[in-house]
Amino acid sequence: MDNDIPVLSDAPVGLEQDELGFGRYVGPLVRVITDAATETPFTIGVYGPWGSGKSSLLRMVDQRLAEDHPGRTIRVHFNPWVHRGEPHLLLPLLHALQDTLEQDGRHRLREAAGRLGHVIAGLTSDTLLRKVSGGAVTLDRIGELSRQYAEQRGKVHSELRNLRRTLQEQADRAAADGARLVIFIDDLDRCQPHEIVDLLESVKLFLDLRHVVVILAVAKNVVDQGIAVKYREFGFDAARVVEIGDEYLDKIVQLPLTLMPIDPGSFLDRLPLPGALAAYRELLAGIVAPNPRRIKRVLNTCAVMSVVGGPPLRADIVIRLVVLRVQSPDLYDAIVARPRLAAALEDMYAGRLPLDRPDRLVERYGQAEAEPMAAAVRRFHRSQDYLGGVFGGTAFTEVKDELPGYLTMLGR
Ligand SMILES: Nc1ncnc2c1ncn2[C@@H]1O[C@H](COP(=O)(O)OP(=O)(O)OP(=O)(O)O)[C@@H](O)[C@H]1O
Ligand SMILES: [Mg+2]
């Protein structure tokens, strides 16, 4: 058992723990947010896949604003997923705003918070709120505005105007005091698809205000799913959904920032890699996904397995299997079901597998296994780029007979 492997936390990190050079995004974002020349309303969208560092970046921007521009921004933090399942996310968003205004000692906004509380009370009828979320942002564009929606819109119009007016008053008041409202909306993609769309619509309808900056973090594909679900009845095809998702965000977001895939090698170099793993840095760098969460998960799984470098298991085999389990669970499961698949894939990558010779396959795998093995190899060979690094040698061939033991140790 190798006890010196630290388990890496999966919490978002701040500026002190930035190992990915996110400072290159933080400086410009903070400048845009605080620069008087930036016209408001202004919305920044931080896009990136699962675990790419969106929450960490938001935290760093927040931190830098607090440290370097304490009086110039009033920072509101809203985590919609904490409130998922509520009839409409607009209400908790308004509450978050109200709480911040109430607590803000510097700008004396208590009175403003009280007024907002009044409007919130007027809006708490969820029937009203459901009517608000009629898709005003998108439906107009796609030309399907229903008559029913128009009628409802009339009914809620005065309430909406009231809310917008109140919010604008708060923002103007803060601005008179030299501050902008900066609203952080994070982890939106953990909500239900329809909630995501509702919240984005609320942002467009209610936070599109002078002196207000919104910074939201979201995985773009999840917004697309939200659109597909919410506008199901229109029967859009997948490509159209992606297009509408783009249009949708384009209308809301003025500054899109997509987090790029990271360089696994340099991330590994900055993590506290213990000796047992450090010896396999090259192997790891060549096969882990360019995503900080996945990399930490691979390293943690190696740590939890507590087998790296510990005989009789070979560390390079354990690392390959852990990477497969984290990054390609379907292939990992296929290997659990047929351990010889791993060596077969090595043969395939080396051009040694006679897939065109059924007799040779039968000779090698037996009558019952030949066909399913060939099908599995065809399915997974080159299915992802990094697999070339996993199956590019002879490691699995060398431990062919012991592989079931490794798989038992690692589990499913
Ligand atoms: N700049 C960074 N330096 C070091 N580690 C980082 C950095 N950014 C993110 N990480 C790590 O990557 C993992 C994912 O980060 P984070 O939670 O910020 O991503 P996310 O995109 O918000 O994820 P989710 O899609 O779940 O919301 C965490 O383990 C975090 O500690
Ligand atoms: Mg996050």
Image: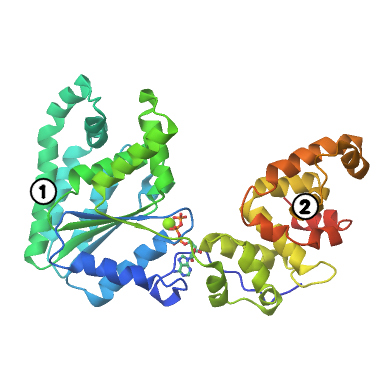
Q: Where in the figure is residue 158, as x and y percent of width and height?
A: 9, 34
Task: Specify the label residue 351 is tagged with.
Answer: 2
At a point 80% along the width and 59% down the height, the residue shown is 396
Which corner quadrant of the figure contains ligand 2? bottom left
Relative to 330, does residue 14 appear above or below in the rendering?
Answer: below
At a point 57% along the width and 71% down the height, the residue shown is 265
At a point 81% along the width and 48% down the height, the residue shown is 353
- Left or right of 207 on screen, residue 330: right
Q: Where in the figure is residue 105, as x and y percent of width and height?
A: 17, 69
Labelled pair 2, 1 in contact (Cβ < 8 Å): no
Task: Specify the label residue 166 is tagged with.
Answer: 1
Q: Is the shortest distance between ligand 2 and the CB of mark 1 under 8 Å? A: no
* Picture quadrant where residue 288 is located: bottom right
Q: How many C-alpha atoms fall within 10 Å of the one at disc 1: few (<14), some, or many (≥20)?
A: some
Q: Considering the numbered disc 1 on the image, is that residue within a helix, a strand or a loop?
A: helix
Closer-to-camera residue (350/261): 350
Q: Look at label 1 and name its amino acid.
A: Thr
* Picture quadrant where residue 160 is located: top left
Q: Where in the figure is residue 390, as x and y percent of width and height?
A: 70, 59
Q: Where in the figure is residue 204, as x and y percent of width and height?
A: 22, 44
Q: Look at label 2 and name its amino acid.
A: Gly
Relative to 169, does residue 88 appear above or below in the rendering?
Answer: above
Can residue 199 be seen at all in this image of the molecule?
no
Q: Is the shortest distance between ligand 1 and the CB of mark 2 under 8 Å? A: no
